Every structure is written in structure tokens, then in C-alpha cells.
Amino acid sequence: MNKQQRESLAKLTKNWPSTMQFDVSMTSYSSLRAGGRAAGLIDIHTLPELQDFLVCLHEQQLVFRVIGRGSNILVTDKGFPGVMIQLKGELEQVCPVEAEKVEGGELLVKAGGGCSLGKFLSWCTKQGLSGLEFMTGIPGSVGGAVRMNAGALGGEIGDRLHSLECVDACGSVIQVPRAELRLSYRKVEFIGRIGRDRERDIDALVVASARFRLIPGVQEEIRSCCTGFLARRKGKQPTGVASAGSFFKNPTGDAAGRLIEAAGLKGHCCGEAMVSPVHANFIVNTGKSTATDILTLMQQVQETVFQKFAVRLEPEVEII
Ligand SMILES: Cc1cc2nc3c(=O)[nH]c(=O)nc-3n(C[C@H](O)[C@H](O)[C@H](O)COP(=O)(O)OP(=O)(O)OC[C@H]3O[C@@H](n4cnc5c(N)ncnc54)[C@H](O)[C@@H]3O)c2cc1C
């Protein structure tokens, strides 16, 4: 980022609640506790701020990436030349006032893209709204979960998605109905009018908020269902250690963890990055692993699994 670009961003954000930061290590913004540096990072609190900021980035020809809780990203040691955006303030609120009825007695609820999944799920439980209990225990934000079509135990967040409010690189707000999204395993694509007109993938749009269709239910039953889902996750995953959850997507009809374990790679290390001995599809940072260590280990796992089983594992983690 050159001096003029830095000055434009600093000038625009001068009186905003959060200061524009430059040359930021992404280590503390990734659950892997590793990663290179970003040229800039900003917390954005309102929709108009987000629009103005994206216009400024566009004018300055700077790239951006939104990050949620960093639980599925790894920035390479080369670093990211643009600006990382985090959604805060109004953009992390759940909106009870927006609760309105849709067909079949379901209720429509709006959650900010920056809202943590944990906060959103407890809000749903308190309001007696059911439908997303299977998401319990998945770290991250609503925006990140939508972008990844995150899910567990047979459910995906997209199952309950009604629509998105996005902002594009020119600062325009776009309402995206569910029908204009193709949601598949850990993947979201735009189809129809938006896909055609914009010719872009979801990374060019910021999910400012998402609306979900939820089912009125009994608070105690919803809470107990969440506890049940959490219990099913426990013991199957490494805890208390830096990771990004499942590192690879499951190939059709198989499990990445099963293949990696069968290839004898549990406990295999590269620097301080290790294939978890608890769950082979978790790459964990056991100390001060670099992004390069993690990516080298990723390639070693891919090559070994390919040689033994002729299956090419694709990372689920977003490598930036
Ligand atoms: C211990 C552990 C367990 C996990 N278990 C699961 C699991 O069971 N199931 C599962 O699906 N995942 C799991 N994950 C992965 C991760 O939690 C999910 O992918 C989560 O939804 C990512 O959310 P995030 O806010 O952290 O996104 P980030 O990691 O910050 O970002 C992920 C992607 O989303 C984009 N993004 C983030 N916010 C926005 C936004 N507002 N608008 C547009 N794009 C955005 C980013 O640019 C990036 O491409 C796990 C991770 C960990 C660490």
C-alpha cells in the first residue's frame, strides 16, 4: 500500500470509532494463531461506514477481505496487500425488532454479519426460536458461517437462510434472496440475476446481515437440543490447541480424517504444525508455527493421501 492510499484511508476513518491500522500481523486474527501481515485492518461499525469505506478502497484500487472470527482462514507468510475488514457495532447485532412472520408460522430474524454465532444461538434460545441448534459449538461469525455454508451433524446454516443484505465493492447495498444463491458443501455461489450482472464470487461482497427462517419452539427443549449437539462434538476434536477445525473438505463418500489417519499421518509434524493425534483432519499449531509450516504440512498430507488412495484433498480453510 502506498503513501497516498494510506493517507486516503486514514483521512476517511479519522473520526470513526476504530482507528485504521496498518501493517498488522494476522496471527491474533486467526484461530490457527499463525499468518502473515495485512497492509491494513479496520473495524467497521455501521452500514454507511461500510459503504463509504468500500468506495474509498475501490477508488484507491485496493483489495479487501472481510474476516469474522478468523476460525477458517490462514494468511500466507507473504502477507495480504489489501485491507482486512471486521464488522462490529451495529453490524454484529441480532435484531429482535425485525422478527416478523413468514409462511408456515416461521419467524424471520436478522443477524449482523459480524455477530458471533455463539451470541446469535443464545439469543435464539432465549427467544424460543428453533432451527439452528446443530450449529452449537461451531466458532465464528454469522457472515463467516454463511460464506462457508458452515454446518455439522447433518445440518448447514444455508438450510435456514432466507436472504442476505450485502454491500458490493462500489458501496451499493444488494438484497440477495435465498433463490439467488447456490449453497453446497462449504460453498456459496451467486446464481440468477446477481450472478449474471455482477460476474463475481462471494468474496467480492460483504455480508452485512443475514435473515433466517426460524421456528417458534420451547426454550427448554431448544436449550437441551443445543447441549446434546455440543456433547456429540466433545471428545472427537482436539481442544485447547490452535486450529481451524477440519482442515480439508470431505471427499464425496469418504472422510478426509479417515484417509489421513489411514495414510499413517496422525502426529506427523512440519515445524510446530502437526496433524492432530486426536482427529487427523485437524492441523494444529503446537507453538509458534508459521503459515509456511502449516501450508507445507498441508501439501505433504495432500501428496501422501493422493499417492496412497488417489484422492486429492481440497482445503476447507480459506488460504489468503
Ligand atoms: C475448533 C473449530 C471447530 C470448527 N468446527 C466446524 C464445524 O463443525 N463445521 C463447520 O462448518 N466449520 C467449522 N469450523 C470452521 C469455522 O468455524 C467456520 O467456517 C466458521 O463459519 C467461520 O466463521 P468466521 O467468522 O470465523 O470466518 P473467517 O474464518 O473469519 O472467514 C472465513 C471466510 O468467510 C469470509 N467472511 C467472513 N465474514 C464475512 C462477511 N461478513 N461477509 C463476507 N465474507 C465473510 C472470509 O473472507 C473468509 O473467506 C471450525 C473451526 C474451529 C476452529
Image: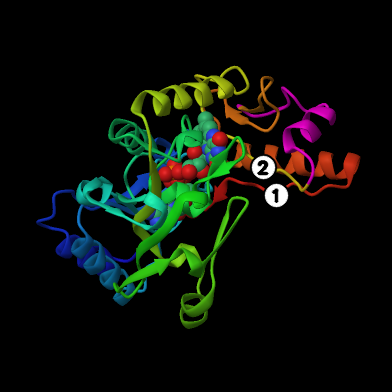
- CA separation in Å, label 2 and label 1: 6 Å
Q: Residue at the far top: name it.
A: 235
Q: Which residues are magenta?
A: 253-272
Whether disc 1's CB lies below 8 Å from ligand 1 is answered no
Q: Residue at the far left: name it.
A: 15
Residue 227, image x, y percentages: 46, 21
Q: Please indicate whether residue 204 sits to the left or right of residue 24 in the image.
A: right
User: Which comes before the other along the chain, label 2 or label 1?
Assistant: 2
Q: Label 1, on which residue?
A: 314
161 vs 127: above or below: below
73 vs 293: above or below: below
**Numbered tag placed on residue 286 in the rendering:** none
Q: Secondary structure at mark 2?
A: loop
Q: Secondary structure at mark 1?
A: loop
Label 1: how many residues lie within 10 Å, few (<14), some (14-19) or many (20+)?
some
Given residues 296 and 96, the one toward you in this image is: 96
Q: Amino acid at mark 2?
A: Phe
Q: Taking the image as drawn, is residue 67 in sight?
A: no
176 vs 147: above or below: below
Q: Label 2, on which residue?
A: 248
Q: Taking the image as drawn, is residue 289 in sight?
A: yes
What residue is at 29 percent from the left and 50 percent from the top?
87
Q: Amino acid at mark 1?
A: Glu
What residue is at 74 percent from the left and 24 percent from the top?
266
Contact (Cβ within 8 Å) of mark 2 with mark 1 = yes
Label 2: how many residues lie within 10 Å, few (<14), some (14-19) or many (20+)?
many
Given residues 308 and 206, the one toward you in this image is: 206
The image quadrant where one finds the N terminus is bottom left
Asked if residue 170 is among those painted magenta in the image, a careful observer would answer: no
